[in-house]
Structures are given as structure tokens and as C-alpha cells.
Image: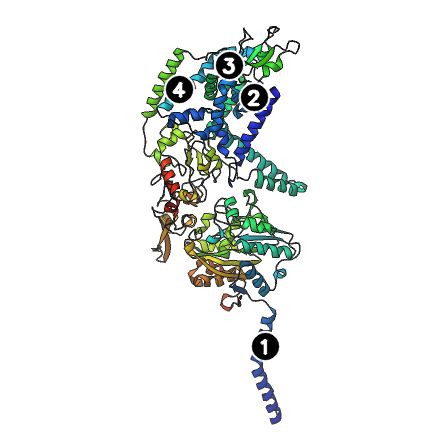
Amino acid sequence: MKRRDFIKASAIGAIGVNLLPLSLHQSNRLKAQTTAPDVVWVENGEPEALFKSAMKELGGINKFISKGDVVVIKPNIGWAKTPEFAATTNPDLVAEIVKQCKEAGAKEVKVFDHTCNPWQRCYNLSGIEEKAGASGAKLTQTYDHKYTNLAINGQHIKEWPIYKDYLEADKVINVPIAKHHGLDRVTLGLKNLMGVMGGRRGSLHNNFGNKMADINSKLIPTLTIIDAYRILTANGPTGGNLSDVKLTKTLIASSCTVSADYVALDLFGHKLHQIQHISIANERGLNKFDLTKLNVKKVKLA
Amino acid sequence: MVKARKISQIFFILFFIFLFIRARYPYEVRIQSDLFLRFSPLMPLFDFIDTLRIDLIFWPALLILLFTPFLGRFFCGWICPLGTTLDAGSKIVKSPSNRKTEKWHKLTYLKFAILFGSIILAVFSLHVWGYFDPLSIFNRALTVVFYPLATLFADHILIGITKIPFLEDPAYAVYDFFKTSVMPENQANYQQLFWIALFIAAILGAEKITRRFWCRYLCPAGALLGFLSQFRFYERIVGEECPSCNLCQKECKMNAIPEGDVKKTSKVECIECFNCGAVCPTKYNAITYRWRWKPYHTPIDYNRRQFLTTTAGSVAAIGLLNIGLKDRKAEAKLIRPPGALPEDDFMDRCIRCLQCVRICESNGGCLQPDQIHNNIMELWLPVAVMREGYCAYDCNLCGQVCPTDAILPLELAQKKKTPMGLAHFDKNLCIPYARNEDCIVCEEHCPTPDKAIKFEVKDFMAPDGSVRKVKYPYVIKDLCIGCGICETKCPIAGQAGIFVTPENQKRLTKDEVGVIRENPNETYSSPY
């Protein structure tokens, strides 16, 4: 090799080596600009504004809901409590989600929950019946005859009755409210899907984390919107004491339930290892994104 | 007149059924659904015996009692829904004519014996009349038998139709309308169904023996109204042109026309159905109805011997009802609705109409017709069966619909602080204690703002040497209101690991509730 050639090659090589990370970095930045974040955290706004902003960050509702879809929205309507007690999902948020789904061309938007208290009182007191109904959602109680056994073939659950409308829906939006829960400190997106399960649900509390992971692996929703407009910090999940309610005016949205739940732990100051059912779901691969490299976009509304 | 009577009967039975159906959450009605129970003529009488006051809350019954001496038993013929049901039933089973049933007629005294016996018992504070009150029977049968049957059939038929492919959508539309507007409840399942069904089946089935068997021979309300209408001013007049064809005698629902002398009418028995006038052949048209200011008198069919026998029997019954074993263990199940009067008063005031059971939010879960534990008088009182359903924290409807205030109408805030009992863990069954594994479903559902079930986290060392943390629940007596949701939701199959007993239950009197209502701020301010 001639000296000139060597110098040339070295120079090119040196430049190349120097440029390589730069170009990699460049390409990463380019990607960040075109793809949506994994999780969006929006705060300081009313429920409608929070949801609108979150959808904008995630690329718009049309990215998730197509024309003619049958959409199931699964809020937490489990308890006969008014919204200020933060035991049930914010009715304005549910109404806004229904509205946007309708605008995106959804054929039908169904809203239901397998309630813990008598369903009429829950639907009524939570305000969801009135507000989501006004936005065009179809609200029905969960009928016993509509639970069908779904093959789970998990580690602990072989099959479990799941609500038919949920399984038959084209798209599913899981809308839990962030609450304290005695069993595993919090109840968020994963636990909220107990509201589409039938059978003897109480028995799921035993070895809860693994059973949740088993069943949830078959129920992955399209979107998870965590309502943290008000959160319940103690005496959950029923609440009833206004001093346990914190006005946080936040919303967390993601196409991955585990990631959304993980990010929502910040609301309570918990760490992932403290929450068994979320860590087990993560270990067992229910997460769409790597929690250690999660791309969270935080938005603070004016 | 027959047409008017039929319209009235249909109107009242539909009105009563309408009120019955409206008796559910959300109970936002202008007409109190227990209004129709307060049509019972027996209610003011026995309320008077109990309280020595005439309560105007029973105004429909008071109106009926006021008009009966003038008009006679128009209530039985024109209003009573049980009577209307029996009339319909007699068409179905084809009751025999009065000619063939003369032998039963000697039983007419029985209804007076039942009425008079009930009065004697009531004077000694044993109110059994509710079991025989026609409106109570009607409501009891609707609640436990007919309405659950209707929901069962409606549900299954509509769901069955949805299985037919091309009918699926319209069938579901009808079903949804049905389940949101007409019968939004889930299927109710009641204990004591067999006996209550047998009771109503016997009353209806007796139509095969004679028409209006119940009204002729057994109904204490009919007896009271008959007693009052001995001199009634509105009379059936049979003209001279009557050829004694006996058509009216055969047609009479109550056998109030004596076979030998069709020109007479028993004012005690006649319920003014006006069928006699309708069957009278048109060429004679001998029967007219008219006011007369000097009415004749029909004595009641109840002689001194029968009177003395009833008295002796009643006194014996009072004694017998008081000498049975009072097993305290059996009292463990006597959990009454929130706001129920103290047990003895409660038994006296409750007429076993089961309107509270009907409106209970659990709908066939929590409130049930009670069985006999220690005392026959416990039969069909409302009892909370917590394993099947719980007392909803935000519901106070049972007290709102009680026609006699046996369950006091508590304000919601007060109801939430009136314990029905106390929850106890059965540590041999409860999963954390028995198996050292987490569960705490009870804690999750506990509805008090500061949870009455709390848990303690303790390390448990498994046989393999590994240590895990387990949550062991316990009850805080001062916070527990005995609503029983923990017992309902306990995930163990069969017997629950937590159960409610009447320990710590608070029974209120009318005076106490009155005082609380006058000082709402003092008592309603939440300590939480």
C-alpha cells in the first residue's frame, strides 16, 4: 500500500468512525420526530383537553380507530359512587373518548362494566350513563348469558369466562381510573380488565399477579387511557372519603397497558418492584415496549 | 253496572301492579308504591290496636271503611286485586255453581273467627293478621312468585329468539328495551318460595270448590267489611214479578242470595258485583238497586259458641306462642333491614307484604322472606341473607316503601350509620388464615369510607424455608355496619370465610328517628 493511499484511507476511516455515531444519532432523532412516543403523560387540564392533547401526541384517534369499527370502551364503573370520590372513571373523559371514536367513524361504541355494586346505581351515580350516553355510546349492563369461556392456557388459568362484546369488538379502549387498592397497592389498566371477566372473580385475588398476567395476555386492548384527573390515595378501591382523593388533573395514554400502568405509578410514588401484578406482567412479556427504555412524552397544558 | 265494576277491577289491579313494578331503584315516583297496601281495610284497625291512634297515613283504607256502612263490601267486588285475581282464576278453573256447593256455606263463620282471633291476638301484641291480609297476600305472591316467573320467562324467551340468526338484532333490541325499561332487574330467587306459592295456589285453587272461596269463608278483611255493612243503605230490591228462577242465586259470587228465598240478600256477604241484575231474564227485569233510608239488617253468621271457641283458641295460641324454646343460636340469623324496629315491635308492625324484599337493591339476594327459627311469627319477616346478597351502602329503599313503618324511613346518611350486625372472620375458612395466601376480597369491597376491614401484613415461612408476606384481615367493630358485602363476595365456595351476625345491630324506635331528623347537622356530620 502506498503512503498516500494509507493516509487517504485513514482519513476517510477516521471521518467515517467519527461520523458513525453522529449519523446513528441523527437517524434516532429523525425517528423520534416521525414516530409517536410509547406513553404520553398530560397534566394540568380538564379531562376533555387532556385526552385531546394525548391523542395529538399519539398521532390522532384515527391511528387507532378505523371507519366502521365496533369499539368497546371499558371504564371503571364498578362502584356506586359519584365522580368526586374518585372510585369510578371520570364521566367527562369517557364522554370525550366516545365522541372522538364516533368522529373517527366508529359504527358503534359500547360502554359497560361488570360492576361490583348494583349496576343501575353504579351507572347512574358515576355519571357515565348520562354523559357517555349523551355522546352516543350504547350503555348496557353485563348480562350473565353473554360471558363465554375463553381458552387462556396460562400458568394458572386454563380458561375463564369473558364478556362476549369485549371479545367481538374491533377495537378496545381500556379507561381505568388510578386508585389505591389494598391487594396490590394500586389498581390501573391491568386490574381494570377484571370488569370484562365473569365467573368467581374473587378467586383471582389469590395469586393475583400471575392470574392477571394469564388472563390479560388474551385481552390486550388497543389503547389504555389512565384517568388520573382525580386519584384515590387510600381506602381504595371503594373510597368514599374526600380527604383520600387527590386532584391531579393528569391523563396517561399508551397503546401498551403495562407501560401505561408503569408510568402511572409515579402518581403514587411507587416503584415497579413494589407492585407485583405489573412486574409479573412485564416479566411475562405482556409489555409492548421495554420499560427500561420507555419513551415517555410529558405535556403540561397551560 | 257490571261493566263499570269490571272496569274498576281492571283499573285497580293494573294500578296496583304498576305501583309494584315502579317499586325499584331509582325510586323517584310521585305516588308511594306502598299506597296500594294502605288500601287494606284491616290496617287502620290493627294500627289502632297497636298505637291507640288513628293514623291518617292509612287514608285509602279509612275512606273505604267510611263508605262501607253505606255501600257495603264494594272494596271486595270493585277494588281488591286478590278478588280480581280470583275472579279471573274462577273462569279458568270453572268454579261449580252454587247449587252444588251448598255444603260449604256453613264455613262463612270462619272469616269472622279469623278476624276476631286476630283481634284478640293483636290486643296481646301478637299481630298475625298480616298473613291473611288480602293485599299483603297479593303483594307477597307478586313479589315471590309471579314477578320472578315473569322475568324468567321473558328473559328466556327473548334470549331464545336471539339464537335465531335473522331475528338476532331485533330480538336483542326488544330484550334491551325490556331490560332497561320494563324489567331491569336480574332474576330474583327467593327462599320460602314453596310455601308462599303453595299459599297462593291454595287460595286460587279453592276456586275449584266454590267461587271466591277465600272471600266467602276466610278473608278477615271481608269479615270486617261484612261486619260494617250489616245495615248498608244501598239495597238489592227484587220486584213482585220475580218468578224465582234462581238464576241470580246460582250466579252469585258470594252465595249471598239464599236458595229458598231469592228476594233476600245477605248484606254481610254481598260484594256488589251486580251480576244478579245482569243475569235476571230481561222479560222480568225484577232486580233493581236502590238507596233506602230504612234498611233491613242482616246479622253476621257468627254465634256465641263460635265466639267462645275462637276466644279460647286465641288465648291458647297466645300462650303457646310464648312458651317455645328461645334458642339464642337460632337468633344468629335474625339480621333485619336497617331501620327495623326492635324485634318485638317489628313483628307486630310487619304485615309480611314483602314490599321491602321486592324493592331491595339486591333483588332476590339480601332481603328474603324469613323462615321459622324460634318462633312461628318469624315466618316471612324480611331477613338479610348476606351470603346471597348484601345491603347496598347507598340504598335505603326498604324503609321508604314499608306501609306500616315497621322499617323506619331512614335518611341515607343515617342508614349508613345504622349497623345491621357485625362481620366476623371464620379463620378456619378464610384463605389468608387457613392457607397463608393473599385474598382480601372482603377488604376490597368494604364500603365504609374508612374501611371496617383492615389487614396486617405478616411474614409467613413456607415449609421450604422461603418467606412471603401475607395480608391477614380483621374487622374493626366501630366501623363495621354489618352490610354483609364481605360475606357475599367471599370467593370461597359454599360457606364464606366471613359472616355477619346480629351482634352490634342497632334497632331504632320511631321516637329516636324523629329526634335525629330534627337535628340533622348534629347527627349527619361525618366523623371521617
Amino acid carrying label 2: it is: Asp
Amino acid carrying label 1: it is: Gln
Residue A95 visible in the current orientation: yes
Element type at marker 2?
Answer: helix
Q: Earlier in the sequence, mark 4 or mark 3?
A: 4
Where residue B117 is drawn, which disc sits there?
A: 4
For marks 1 and 4, give the one nearer the viewer: 4
Q: Earlier in the sequence, mark 2 or mark 4?
A: 2
Q: Residue lying at the far bottom in this picture: please name it.
A: A3
Amino acid carrying label 4: it is: Gly
- Tell me if residue B240 comes above or below residue A244 in the rendering: above
Residue highlighted by disc 1: A26
> Is the residue under label 3 in contact with that under label 2 (CB below 8 Å)?
no
Residue highlighted by disc 2: B87
Label 2, label 3: how many angstroms apart (C-alpha)? Answer: 20 Å
- Disc 2 crowd rating (10 Å Cα; few below 14, some 14-19, many 20+) is some
| Picture coordinates of residue B338, whole percent (x, y) | 40, 39
Residue highlighted by disc 3: B267
Label 1, label 2: how many angstroms apart (C-alpha)? Answer: 91 Å
Give left or right: position of A302 versus A240: right
| Picture coordinates of residue B266, whole percent (x, y) | 51, 12
Amino acid carrying label 3: it is: Lys
- Determine which quarter of the picture holds residue B412: top left
| Picture coordinates of residue B473, whole percent (x, y) | 36, 50
The chain under label 2 reads B
